[in-house]
Image (tube, rainbow, N blue to C red):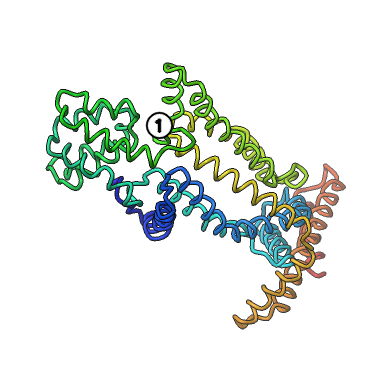
Amino acid sequence: MILNPDTGKILGPIAKYILGPILNAIFDFLNWIKIPNVGLAIILFTIVIYILLLPLTIKQQKFSKLQAKMNPELQAIQKKYKDKKDQESQMAMNQETQAVYAKYGVSPTGSCVQLIIQMPILFALYRVIYKIPAYVPMVKNVFGDLVSKLADKKDPATTLLQSFSGAGQFKNEFTNELFTSGNVEYVKNTFIDVLNRASTSEWESIYASENFPELKDTVINVMAQLSKFNNFLGLNIGDSPLYTVKTAFASHHFGLLLLAVLIPVLSAVTQWVNVKLTPQVSKNQSSGNEQADQMANSMKAMNTFMPLMSAFFCFTLPAGMGIYWIAGAVVRSIQQVAINKYIDKMDIDEVIKKNQEKREAKLKKAGIDPNAISSNANRSTKAMERLNMIKEENEKKLAAAQASDKPKGSIASKANLVKEFNEKNNNK
């Protein structure tokens, strides 16, 4: 069920046991201080989550700083083995690359660990905000009386709610066996899902329907309670800015129209500022690495495209999602300014030294001698280099010998020449 907490193996537990309770606690606190506002709860919720993620963000950007310092050495290794595809050369390239990472005391996976931890949390964060009634009982309870009465007239109520603009995303819920068999709890939850995304005019269409004239007072009461929760600076965050613009223009309420337009505009601007503040991979850092160049170009295109996409989505989705995106971008931008100052003042050589000490401590704890690993890696790399030099020298000598051989020479003489050449080199 969409209304109920997610049941996914990863996002479900994160949303249900971590993020959902945090949002509910924030809303309860706001209700305790007599301002139970969903928009304000979303802003505070976003701030809290990004503060909790701050240590991971700092670690990720520390690695990016080290990556920039390592790149010239890594690129030199890639250039050295660019045209060598044999197994020995590839092994030598991998060993030299590992030696560089060991030198700086970091893992090749680097920031991947931080991203793996952060991404599920951020996806779950989006889901919690998108379906607040599933995680905030106080909001869900507002719908209780109305959906109970609608469930008593399930068929006409289903027909009406399926005509709402946001009902399409719940097609599977309407066709689910629990819904068609009349499971009361499932039917109510499905109705709440649709009503939670209904516009003001869609709410009014319920009591305007000939099937539910007796629900007018109930609907008005629910709308009043939701308005108390959803009103943010004069905007109903349950309505999309597009819907608000249309209604505000029709009623000549131009102040409200301006506020509605500001949601997608601020979303795009704050996303753009956040992108500009975030360190990007420069051409100098990625030059010489075709894969890195492609990734840098893709990131540049995405960074240009995403602010525009966020403006479009914020214009068509409920204003609450736009508030979440704006709050998230502002918090990330403030964090980024602080992180940039911290990273700029950071003694990169001292960080490398500490990383090396941590790496050596881990190896010793595992019963491995770090010096032996470095020594073996250096010997192996030098041996590979020596083999490659001998191979290249032999190839040059063989080519020179073949070029000096007279055209009239017999096949046997050529074979003997190659044999003598091989024996000579094997005896070295």
Q: In this view, does 421 lie above or below 3?
A: below
Q: In this view, does 266 lie above or below 129?
A: above
Residue 422: x and y in percent read 77, 61
Left or right of 102 in this view: 227: left
Task: Identify the residue shown where x is 45% and y is 50%.
Answer: 125
Binning the other alpha carbons within 10 Å of mark 1 as few (below 14), some (14 to 19) or many (20 upward) gives: many
User: Which quarter of the figure is the C terminus placed in?
Assistant: bottom right
Of 277 and 140, the residue lying toward us: 140
Left or right of 147 in this view: 419: right
Residue lying furthest front: 34
Q: Report the number of discs.
A: 1
Quadrant of res 181: top left
Residue 241: x and y in percent read 46, 28
Residue 233: x and y in percent read 49, 36
Task: Identify the residue shown where x is 54% and y is 51%.
Answer: 47
What residue is shown with label 1? Answer: 239
Residue type at mark 1: give it. Answer: Asp
Secondary structure beneath label 1: loop
Task: Identify the residue shown where x is 33% and y is 28%.
Answer: 165
Residue 85: x and y in percent read 67, 51
Task: Identify the residue shown where x is 29% and y is 36%.
Answer: 194
Of 292 and 246, the residue lying toward us: 246
Of 272 and 115, the residue lying toward us: 272
Of 416 and 192, the residue lying toward us: 192
Q: Is residue 198 above or below residue 364?
A: above
Quadrant of res 222: top left
